Image (cartoon, helix red, strand yellow):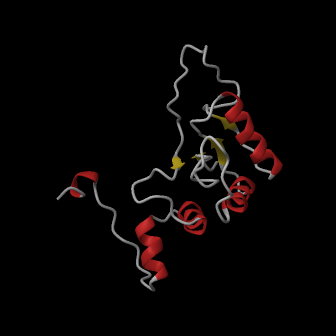
Amino acid sequence: MKKRITLAIDFDGTLVEHKYPKIGKEIPFAVDTVKMLHREGYRLILWTVREGPLLDEAVEWCKKRGLSFYAINRNYPEESIQDESYSRKLKADLFIDDRNIGGLPSWGMIYKMISQGMSFQEVILQSLGESKRLPKKKWFEFWK
């Protein structure tokens, strides 16, 4: 059985332009890409700093556009702050967030990286016509 991949997706600056506490304009192709990932079986978690009424507004914004999430600001829907094992740290496989080093790639690049298991560097090289996959480096070789 194929492992279900969990994606944690930020709201402000990722699905919409960063206008917190207001909701900015939708970032091009964000909604369509998230819907496509959902249809393809990825487990989606909305992961945002928003709480209370601001979170309710964001969730409603998503619902109006047909976005559905497995959970919101938690690992699974039933998880509660009162749970002994509760942690704000998600157990996601990938995080899609505008605060990444280098910022947020286009949603087309994000989809390609996730669906084809490619790194950002590989997507860039492919777009430049370079087709070979790069050798994986060990984390400690990165700093040499």
Asked if residue 9 lies left or right of residue 61, the reply is left
The answer to whether residue 7 of the structure is visible from this angle is: no
- Up-down relation of residue 22 to residue 126 (above or below): above
Q: Nearer the viewer, residue 49 or 140?
A: 49
Residue at image position (40%, 60%) is: 102
- Up-down relation of residue 91 to residue 12 (above or below): above
Q: Position of residue 99 (x, y in %)?
A: 46, 50
Q: Position of residue 18 (x, y in %)?
A: 57, 51
Q: Nearer the viewer, residue 87 or 20?
A: 20
Number of numbered labels in the structure image: 0
Q: Residue furthest left?
A: 144
Asked if residue 39 lies left or right of residue 117, the reply is right
Residue at image position (68%, 57%) is: 25
Residue at image position (28%, 52%) is: 139
Residue at image position (71%, 41%) is: 58
- Hey, which quadrant is residue 48 in on the image? top right
- Hey, which quadrant is residue 84 in on the image? top right
The answer to whether residue 69 of the structure is visible from this angle is: yes
- Hey, which quadrant is residue 45 in on the image? top right
- Up-down relation of residue 48 to residue 17 (above or below): above
Quarter placement of the C terminus? bottom left
Q: Position of residue 137 (x, y in %)?
A: 29, 60
Asked if residue 84 lies left or right of residue 44, the reply is left
Q: Nearer the viewer, residue 68 or 58?
A: 58
Q: Nearer the viewer, residue 62 or 39?
A: 62
